[in-house]
Image (spheres, helix red, strand yellow):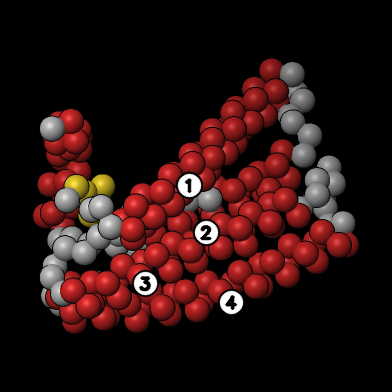
């Protein structure tokens, strides 16, 4: 098996789907990073324009408000796949084997239920903005593109949660401590060691081997 961060892989159908879907999540995260870059560039131009020419960018606040949805939501599924969301694992971290996978299965199922409700609510919010022609206050930017990002990103998150449910059910059936396609619970020492290895380039050497 090979590891991508804290997620293991093998030749199973589940693992192949996990890696394929991870490419989409990575592209969306890259798009979110590009949005941050554009926002920083916009802020720089706005500051220089105000300072040198006494002429800031018209509607700067409107553009920032619209960009927030792209920045906040495009990477949400990627973070879930990598186990990067904040979680309390003081109790869960003590579980092993099927007890751990059952707990993760239940919590992931609850997350999927909450995400499904959010998808519905955010889609209705987008549809209302689209149908009434809602726009920003300053330069009348249409707000529906930013609002559409939210249900799309949450739908991709829901698909990731479905893959992880499959992974936890598979782990629950097979037992063991190293299932594929799900983020593994790591100690602080493990995380520090992995990050140090990534910085030093040892992980890349392993992949080449």
Query: For the image shown, how many numbered marks are present on the structure?
Result: 4
45 displayed left or right of 204: right
What's the CA distance linking mark 1 and mark 4? Answer: 23 Å
- Give the residue at mark 3: 165
The answer to which of marks 1 and 3 sits earlier in the sequence is 1
- Give the residue at mark 1: 24
- The reply to whether residue 124 is in sight is yes
Name the image quarter holding the C terminus. top left
What's the CA distance linking mark 3 and mark 2? Answer: 14 Å
The answer to which of marks 3 and 4 sits earlier in the sequence is 4
Return the mark for residue 14.
Answer: none
The answer to which of marks 1 and 4 sits earlier in the sequence is 1
Return the mark for residue 156.
Answer: 2
The answer to which of marks 2 and 4 sits earlier in the sequence is 4
Neighbours of disc 2 within 10 Å: few (<14), some (14-19), many (20+) = many
Neighbours of disc 3 within 10 Å: few (<14), some (14-19), many (20+) = many
x then y, percent, for residue 175? 16, 74
What's the CA distance linking mark 3 and mark 4? Answer: 18 Å
């Amino acid at each position: 098996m090979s590891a991508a961060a804290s997620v293991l892989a093998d030749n199973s159908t589940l693992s192949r789907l996990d890696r394929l879907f991870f490419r989409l999540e990575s592209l969306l995260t890259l798009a979110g990073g590009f949005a941050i870059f554009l926002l920083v560039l916009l802020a720089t131009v706005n500051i220089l324009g105000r300072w040198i020419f006494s002429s800031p960018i018209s509607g700067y606040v409107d553009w920032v408000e619209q960009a927030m949805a792209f920045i906040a939501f495009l990477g949400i599924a990627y973070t879930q796949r990598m186990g990067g969301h904040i979680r309390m694992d003081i109790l869960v971290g003590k579980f092993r084997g099927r007890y751990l996978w059952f707990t993760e299965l239940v919590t992931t199922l609850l997350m999927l239920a909450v995400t499904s409700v959010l998808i519905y609510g955010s889609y209705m919010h987008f549809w209302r903005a689209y149908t009434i022609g809602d726009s920003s206050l300053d330069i009348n930017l249409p707000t529906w593109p930013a609002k559409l990002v939210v249900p799309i990103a949450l739908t991709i998150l829901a698909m990731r949660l479905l893959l992880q449910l499959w992974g936890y059910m598979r782990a629950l059936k097979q037992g063991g401590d190293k299932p594929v396609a799900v983020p593994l619970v790591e100690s602080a020492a493990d995380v520090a060691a992995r990050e140090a290895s990534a910085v030093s380039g040892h992980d890349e050497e392993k992949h080449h081997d």
